[in-house]
Image (tube, rainbow, N blue to C red):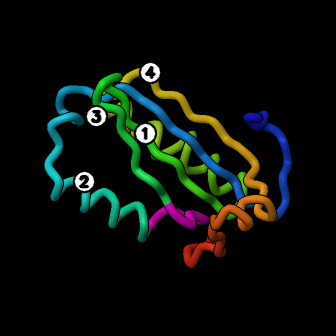
Amino acid sequence: MPLPLNMEIIDMAIILQVNYTPSAQQDQQSDAARIESAENIAKNVAGLQWKVWISNTTEKLRGGIYLFDDLDSAKAWGEGNLRERLAAGGGTNISITYFEANEKLSAITRATFSKSAIAA
């Protein structure tokens, strides 16, 4: 179930799911540019444990599944730089949703969790 944005969660991993329709410019972005973007995100996004890049070429959708250390870090990225970057590149229908990660059940199904090296 998505989290209300004002919910306080202390020391719980948070999933941020983003979906959007890419612009023609975003759709034609080179692999080198995407790699540079991935490296920048990995180095500079506070509280980020990992990101999975997703796309659906049939539906012309892109997105990402992010795991953050906490809700504050997830919201800082999701409602700040992420939304701004997607919109500035011409992305539309931007949807960002936050979820609590059930670490105990997820570990049983082989999910891995570790605190971010970049503090919020």
The residue beneath circle 4 is 93
Nearer the camera: disc 3 or disc 1: 1
Which residue does the numbered mark 3 point to in the structure image?
A: 89
Disc 2 crowd rating (10 Å Cα; few below 14, some 14-19, many 20+) is few
- Residue 77 is one of the magenta-drawn residues: no
Q: Secondary structure at mark 3?
A: loop
Residue highlighted by disc 2? 34
Name, please, the residue furthest toward the front. 109
Find numbered disc 2 in the image and state the secondary structure of the residue it sits on. Answer: helix
Figure quadrant of the C terminus: bottom right
Residue wearing tag 1: 63
3D distance between C-alphas at marks 1 and 2 = 13 Å
Please report the residue visible at 51 percent of the width from the left and 38 percent of the height from the top: 18
Could you say where residue 115 lies in the image, as x and y percent from the top left? 65, 74
Q: Which residues are magenta?
A: 44-50
- Spatial CA span between label 3 and label 1: 14 Å
The amino acid type, in three-letter code, at marker 2 is: Arg
* Marks 1 and 4 in Cβ contact (< 8 Å): no
Please say if 1 is above or below 71: above
> In this picture, is 30 found above or below 6?
below
Instruction: Name the kind of residue labelled 3 in the image.
Output: Gly
Sequence-wise first label, 2 or 3: 2
Mark 2 vs mark 3, CA separation in Å: 13 Å
- 97 over 101 or under it: above or below: above
Badge 4 density bin: few <14, some 14–19, many ≥20, Cα 10 Å: few
Residue at the location (40% across, 50% down)? 53
Q: Amino acid at mark 4?
A: Asn
